[in-house]
Amino acid sequence: MSRKMFQEFRHRRPLALLIPLLIAAVLVPILISRCGMGRAAARPLRQPRAVVDAHAPQAPAAPSVPASAPLSMDLGRARLDGSRYVVDAADGRTVELTLEPALQKRAEEVFRRHAVAYGGAVFVSIPDGRVLAMTGHSRAEPKRTVADLTLLPWAPAASVFKVITSAALLTAGGVDPARRVCYHGGGSRLRRENLEDRPRLDRRCGTLAEAIGSSTNSIIAKLAYRHLDPETLGAYAQAFGFNVRLQRSDAFPLEMAESPAEMPTEDLEFARTAAGFWHVFLSPLHGARIASAFANGGAMVAPRLVERVRDPDGTIQEPTPAPPQHAIPAAVAREVGRMMVRTTRAGTARGAFMRGGRRALPFDVAGKTGTLSRRRPYTHYNWFVGFAPADNPKVAFGVLVGTSGNHVKAAAVAREVLSAARLDASGPVTPTASSPTAVAHHEP
């Protein structure tokens, strides 16, 4: 090679090397993103890893969902025998369940019809804790069991936790539920300035009762910041069953996972937690039990799934249910219960329970909504817990829907299931002889 040819090659060499590098820089990210999209689409149900507020610290990791919940009784083998669901045990005994066919079938049908990515619902009777409906559905992971989707805390409690904060504010905090608190911002995120009084910005005012109905983050956060501390709110969370594992019993022979709750000591993150921004996780069964406390004089019912057991020789055994767990004074339970009625009459669940100025059901429903989203993969969690009828509770419930798009909301699911029951003023919950399927209504 001549010296001149060598010089020309040496000057062209950087350009020759640069062209392949530019091509790689364009193609490699595309290939990686496509692979990543495939992995995200196939990613199984997991606990949230990122907070919705970009300015907040990383949310604490909750226990990952195992492949299936440990069972002593296989609900997947339940069958309808006359007017009762029964399960044949491995030892030859027949277990009669407390499930009410009308409510159970309606709950299963609603989830199946709307093809939710993840959904779980539990309805229990007041005051005896009999499980009237217990179902789960997952379009994203069809092999998920009912136990996975109803007994495991696979979603953040979100604004459902506001009812516990409110109970603490009324008792330990001494807050007047009618006192007006002025605020600004806090709709989708909370900053330190939202905890401070700023007359030029605080153009809106509301009471604690109104904050429950409309799920106003700033009011709850401000009051918790001023009147509570992590130790006190943590004690109330524990009184409502957080960080406490329920033991299996003959009346409820399924493993119930512990719902984790962390109380941050940093002021702003504590206020966020009190308002429902992460750090607390919940299962649908636990959500129903929390709601039962406000319907049952401050005592959370112990769930009962087994009505009776029939031995091969015909002997009948009826398990003894566990006693209810006292959480708060009865007067406080009634006060928060009245606040929860505002949710369905004029608050965040009005679209599901009101038609113009009329109720969608023959009775009032008390409830609390909760919504929160994680980023990767995107999952929107939607809660509705509560009890009905509001003035004479017969049933409490916890409904949770997890989706990646715009699907039926938990409040609409609860309304449809409640429409399948006749809640008499004096007697227990009884199934209706014939109840038309309601049309799901999406909130604004």
Image (cartoon, grey):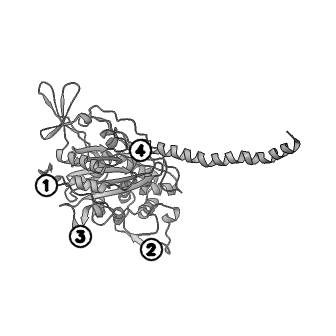
- Which mark, residue 203? 2
- Quarter of the rendering containing residue 5: top right
Mark earlier in primary sequence (3, 4): 4
**Kind of residue at disc 4:** Pro
Which x, y percent locates residue 8? Answer: 82, 47
**Kind of residue at disc 3:** Gly
Mark 2: few/some/many CA within 10 Å (<14, 14-19, 20+): few
Mark 3: few/some/many CA within 10 Å (<14, 14-19, 20+): few
Element at badge 4?
A: loop
- Which mark, residue 357? 3
Which residue reaches farthest bottom? 200
Q: Nearer the viewer, mark 3 or mark 4?
A: 3
Query: CA gap, disc 3 to disc 4?
Result: 40 Å
In the picture of the structure, the residue carrying the numbered disc 1 is 424
Mark earlier in primary sequence (4, 2): 2
Q: What residue is shown at x 31% (from left), y 52% (from top)? A: 328
Q: What residue is shown at x 43% (from left), y 59% (from top)? A: 224
- Which mark, residue 273? none
**Kind of residue at disc 1:** Asp
Mark earlier in primary sequence (1, 3): 3
Query: CA gap, disc 4 to disc 2?
Result: 36 Å
In the picture of the structure, the residue carrying the numbered disc 4 is 260
Figure quadrant of the N terminus? top right
